[in-house]
Image (cartoon, rainbow, N blue to C red):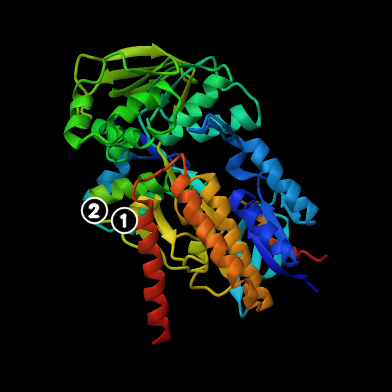
């Protein structure tokens, strides 16, 4: 006889843990699964200074969540990989490398994955995604190399480059990936500039001060700034950030030995004759994040393509319900946003699941309050991944309504 | 640039993808099946957005609401003993 859990939560990041806490507060039988040896998800790697000057330390935030979850006797199982989920009648079967679980409800809180920004030579040892560098630096405390370069200039890579600097890792510079059909906007200096203006408020730093000058400026002013971008780059914490230079290739016999950098036009086209070779022993590629929604796709949840949210997201409502009864989503799987937003969404999902499991409508108030909290956290977020998050969110909610009306017919 | 690998697990280059799309004038799904791009060990987790971008460019298919290249279990690399076994969580 297999034990039927009230809910299985896949992912122990801020969303999964917050949801688990809300469920345990209502005494549900909860199992949290995560394939990493430590709970906390990508929260573990985060370390940045808020505009107020306060430090956001992901390890400490994880400890707080875990302390609360442990106080509530939450069953958290690590190093468990979920490879398949199916629903038979009213039961979810969750297939893992350590056996199969059954549950009446599931929450998929699997977060995001990194998009590759491939450039020639990116398969050499010593090339890693910026997220991998973050995990090695802040979670495993392993020095990724002696001298490196960051390819890709965006919110995520700026934050992680700073973390690596704080850990004493030598970075030559940050530059764009060479333009190709895959790298797209990430290799367009004007588009990158728009992105930088959005992280302008990530004070106090040089980078930010630089960006904030252009944050509210017109497109014309920003384009002018791109045109006259200093050839030496703009220094962020002493490290040059280039948006008019791109890494065109990574070289090495058996591992990374150097990269070729060249100047690019305001459209990102390489300017011939400007190539220079820079010796590095590691390269961090930052192609951005996309919602990791494989399990929702396997379950047949309808999707919607929302650029503002980072790509294809499972259609859900503000209560974090999907079209599949008993299947909930929270965190970055619903769109790329900060860990704080993910946590707030997790709380919503947790109360929604408790309400469904217990048929307790008095939880409505908790859900409403938690939904308000998501909006407040989003409005105050210091890292905004996309300026039109709200519009993106509204389109998902609308899609959910449309699906609901159609299925009633 | 053309020789650049896009799908690392199956070692499919940018040129393979573009040429296949041109030669067969086919859908993104068919290009995937012909080249095995995104069908390797990682299940497409690394190259999925990249393969999508190449195929969107080559075939002119715009991103639609459904996930372009179908996701199938197992979504994580698993030992055959796990997939073939009949383990249950009997506690």
Q: Are marks 2 and 1 in contact (CB under 8 Å)?
A: yes
Quadrant of the image containing the N terminus of chain A:
bottom right
| Residue at 19% in and 24% down | A227
Task: Give the farthest residue toward the right.
Answer: B91
Relative to residue A131, is residue A315 depicted above or below?
below
Quadrant of the image containing the C terminus of chain A:
bottom left
**Label placed on residue A326:** none
Q: Can residue A123 be seen in this snapshot? A: no
Quarter of the image for residue A253 reads top left
Q: Position of residue B87 (x, y in %)?
A: 75, 63
Q: Mark 2 points at which residue?
A: B59
Q: Earlier in the sequence, mark 2 or mark 1?
A: 1
**Mark 2–mark 1 distance (CA, rounded to whole Å):** 7 Å
Q: Position of residue A298 (x, y in %)?
A: 51, 64
Quarter of the image for residue A261 reads top left
- Nearer to the camera, B20 or A348: A348
């Amino acid at each position: 006889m297999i034990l039927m859990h009230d809910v299985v939560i896949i992912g122990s990041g801020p969303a999964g843990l917050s949801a688990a806490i809300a469920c345990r507060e209502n005494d549900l039988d909860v199992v949290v699964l995560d394939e990493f040896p430590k709970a906390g998800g990508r929260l573990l790697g985060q370390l940045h200074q808020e505009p107020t000057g306060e430090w956001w330390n992901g390890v400490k935030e994880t400890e707080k969540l875990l302390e609360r979850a442990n106080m509530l006797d939450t069953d958290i199982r690590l190093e468990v990989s979920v490879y398949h989920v199916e629903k038979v009648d009213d039961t979810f079967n969750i297939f893992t490398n350590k056996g199969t679980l059954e549950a009446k409800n599931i929450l998929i809180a699997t977060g995001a994955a990194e998009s590759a920004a491939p450039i020639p030579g990116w398969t050499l040892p010593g090339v890693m995604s910026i997220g991998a560098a973050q995990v090695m630096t802040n979670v495993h405390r392993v020095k990724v190399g002696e001298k490196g370069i960051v390819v890709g200039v965006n919110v995520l890579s700026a934050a992680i480059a700073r973390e690596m600097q704080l850990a004493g890792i030598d970075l030559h510079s940050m530059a764009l990936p060479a333009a190709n059909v895959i790298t797209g906007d990430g290799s367009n200096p004007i588009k990158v500039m728009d992105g930088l203006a959005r992280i302008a408020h990530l004070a106090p730093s040089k980078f930010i001060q630089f960006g904030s000058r252009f944050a509210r400026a017109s497109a014309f002013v920003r384009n002018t700034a791109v045109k006259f971008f200093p050839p030496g780059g703009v220094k962020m914490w002493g490290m040059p950030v280039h948006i008019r230079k791109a890494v065109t290739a990574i070289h090495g016999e058996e591992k990374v030995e150097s990269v070729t950098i060249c100047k690019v036009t305001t459209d990102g086209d390489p300017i011939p004759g400007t190539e220079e070779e820079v010796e590095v022993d590691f390269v961090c590629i930052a192609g951005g994040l996309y919602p990791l929604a494989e399990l929702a796709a396997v379950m047949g949840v309808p999707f919607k393509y929302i650029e503002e949210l980072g790509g294809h997201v499972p259609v859900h409502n503000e209560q974090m319900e999907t079209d599949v009864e008993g299947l909930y989503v929270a965190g970055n799987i619903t769109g790329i946003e900060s860990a704080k937003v993910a946590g707030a969404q997790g709380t919503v999902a947790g109360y929604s699941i408790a309400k469904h499991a217990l048929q307790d409508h008095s939880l409505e108030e908790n859900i409403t309050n938690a939904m308000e909290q998501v909006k407040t956290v989003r409005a105050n977020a210091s890292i905004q991944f996309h300026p039109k998050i709200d519009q993106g969110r509204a389109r998902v909610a609308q899609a959910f309504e449309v699906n609901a009306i159609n299925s009633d017919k | 640039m053309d020789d650049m690998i896009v799908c690392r697990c199956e070692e499919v280059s940018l040129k393979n993808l573009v040429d296949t799309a041109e030669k067969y004038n086919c859908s993104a799904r068919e290009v995937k099946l012909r080249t095995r791009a995104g069908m390797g060990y990682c299940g497409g987790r690394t190259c999925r957005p990249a393969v999508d971008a190449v195929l969107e460019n080559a075939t002119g298919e715009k991103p639609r609401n459904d996930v372009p290249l179908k996701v199938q279990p197992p979504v994580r690399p698993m030992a055959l003993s796990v997939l073939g076994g009949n383990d249950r969580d009997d506690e």
